[in-house]
């Protein structure tokens, strides 16, 4: 049996915990509602107004003008996440984090210490509530797909168990879009073909589903519809990428200011790589202009790096080559094709250039200062002011 735990409205719940007077109010965590950006998460009170994660912040403000809009405090959320994950690790050595607020646990062999899986799930919920004053939803089922589905069926603050002999009873009446991998368009295609429920999807002939979804996708979703999922809980998974992007309060067309923003973004990505013990073989630039046209460019390095200087230089060259001539709404820098410091990357036969070696030393000094005194304690002089004022961070 697999246990899946998902913290309820994580960022918003932490903010309410820190400010109890917000309890019962529609709390929306994300960008400034007077500017642009998106909702990071919101309380269940805000969701009643149709507000949801990733919604443009302006739309959230129109739907819920009485909402309490709060900025993202990522350092606080990360600290709470570490404490949540530490609780999970007390009940099983096999914990697979899916995000900052969600994880799978394989509890096979843990029953002798903590009881059957349902009891383990109950104890996890109780400990999170008693020690962190937060609520979570938990699902218990024979595999990862069913455990995550059980969690969703029980939200918020639920504990849902799908026993092996209950799988068909639970799955069959659910709509097809409850199967992970079936989005809005796929669900519409299946419904047009007469397949509305998971039970109907499980019983449908493969050719019929393939006409709607394609061969590989059809085989995958039909396995899930039958309740089949043989994926193991993986305690450590190499992340695919680390990145940072920024939606500006107003469109930017000044090349100097855009280069400053790239410098700041590259520094955030470099710091994240070093903090987690990674280097990257490539960097991707994302530019979205005022008319919502998105351009991406990628550069591959001759050897992995975590240098702020190297990342910034590559991002700036990609931006200049893209020849963006219209005002910019969003910029993003992402490191991909990551290498962990304990991985099998073969060292180069040639010495690292003096410039990059010095840059690496400076980066690590910056990291130590920022960990002690805050993220803005030590920054490149270029970022201290723009047009006589501080760099705008939105």
Image (tube, rainbow, N blue to C red):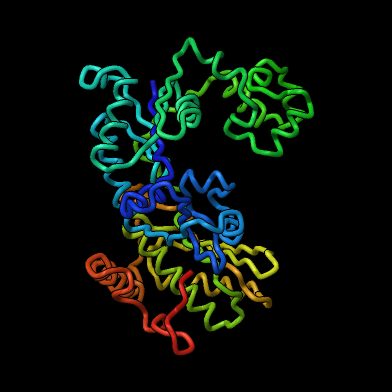
Let me know if residue 78 appears in the view.
no
Measured from the top left, where is residue 195 in percent x and y? 73, 23
In the rendered view, does 273 fall on the left or right side of 331?
A: left
Let me know if residue 215 appears in the view.
yes
Counting labels gives: 0
At 46% from the left and 28% from the top, the residue drawn is 154
At 47% from the left and 60% from the top, the residue drawn is 69
Closest to the observer, 174 or 327: 174
On the image, which quarter does residue 62 sit in? bottom right
Measured from the top left, where is residue 277 in percent x and y? 32, 54
Closest to the observer, 20 or 7: 20
Closest to the observer, 28 or 75: 28
In the rendered view, does 103 fall on the left or right side of 34?
A: left
Residue 140 against residue 356 in the figure, above or below: above
Measured from the top left, where is residue 1 in percent x and y? 38, 20
In the rendered view, does 204 fall on the left or right side of 119?
A: right
Residue 66 against residue 373 in the figure, above or below: above
In the rendered view, does 250 fall on the left or right side of 290?
A: left
Residue 285 against residue 41 in the figure, above or below: below
At 57% from the left and 33% from the top, the residue drawn is 180
Measured from the top left, where is residue 64 in percent x and y? 56, 54
At 72% from the left and 32% from the top, the residue drawn is 214
Residue, far top:
165
Residue 22 against residue 197 in the figure, above or below: below
Closest to the observer, 120 or 127: 127
């Amino acid at each position: 049996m697999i246990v899946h735990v998902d913290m309820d409205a994580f960022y918003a719940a932490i903010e309410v915990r820190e400010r109890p007077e917000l309890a019962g109010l529609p709390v929306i965590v994300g960008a400034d509602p007077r500017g642009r950006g998106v909702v990071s998460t919101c309380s269940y009170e805000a969701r009643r107004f149709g507000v949801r994660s990733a919604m443009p912040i302006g739309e959230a403000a129109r739907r819920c003008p009485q909402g309490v809009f709060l900025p993202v405090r990522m350092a606080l959320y990360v600290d709470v996440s570490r404490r949540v994950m530490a609780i999970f690790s007390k009940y099983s050595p096999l914990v697979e984090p899916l995000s900052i607020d969600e994880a799978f646990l394989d509890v096979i062999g843990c029953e002798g210490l903590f009881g059957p899986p349902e009891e383990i799930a109950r104890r996890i919920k109780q400990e999170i509530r008693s020690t962190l004053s937060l609520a979570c939803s938990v699902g218990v089922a024979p595999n990862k797909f069913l455990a995550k589905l059980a969690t969703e069926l029980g939200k918020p603050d639920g504990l849902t168990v799908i026993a092996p002999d209950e799988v068909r009873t639970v799955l069959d009446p659910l709509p097809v879009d409850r199967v992970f991998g079936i989005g809005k368009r796929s669900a519409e295609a299946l419904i047009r073909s007469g397949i509305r429920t998971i039970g109907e999807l499980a019983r449908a002939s493969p050719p019929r589903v393939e006409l709607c979804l394609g061969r590989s996708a059809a085989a995958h979703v039909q396995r899930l519809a039958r309740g089949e999922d043989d994926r193991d809980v993986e305690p450590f998974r190499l992340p695919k990428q680390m990145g940072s992007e920024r939606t500006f309060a107003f469109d930017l067309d000044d090349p100097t200011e855009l280069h400053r923003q790239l410098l700041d973004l590259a520094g955030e990505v470099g710091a994240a790589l070093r903090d987690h013990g990674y280097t990257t073989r490539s960097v991707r630039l994302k530019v979205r202009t005022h008319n919502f046209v998105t351009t991406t460019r990628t550069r591959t390095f001759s050897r992995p790096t975590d240098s702020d200087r190297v990342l910034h230089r590559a991002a700036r060259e990609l931006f200049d080559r893209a020849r963006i001539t219209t005002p910019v709404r969003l910029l993003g820098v992402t490191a991909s094709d990551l290498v962990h410091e304990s991985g099998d990357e073969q060292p180069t036969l040639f010495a690292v250039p003096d410039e990059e070696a010095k840059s690496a030393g400076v980066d690590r000094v910056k990291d130590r200062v920022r960990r002690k005194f805050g993220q803005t304690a030590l920054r490149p002089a270029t970022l201290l002011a723009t047009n006589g004022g501080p760099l705008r961070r939105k």
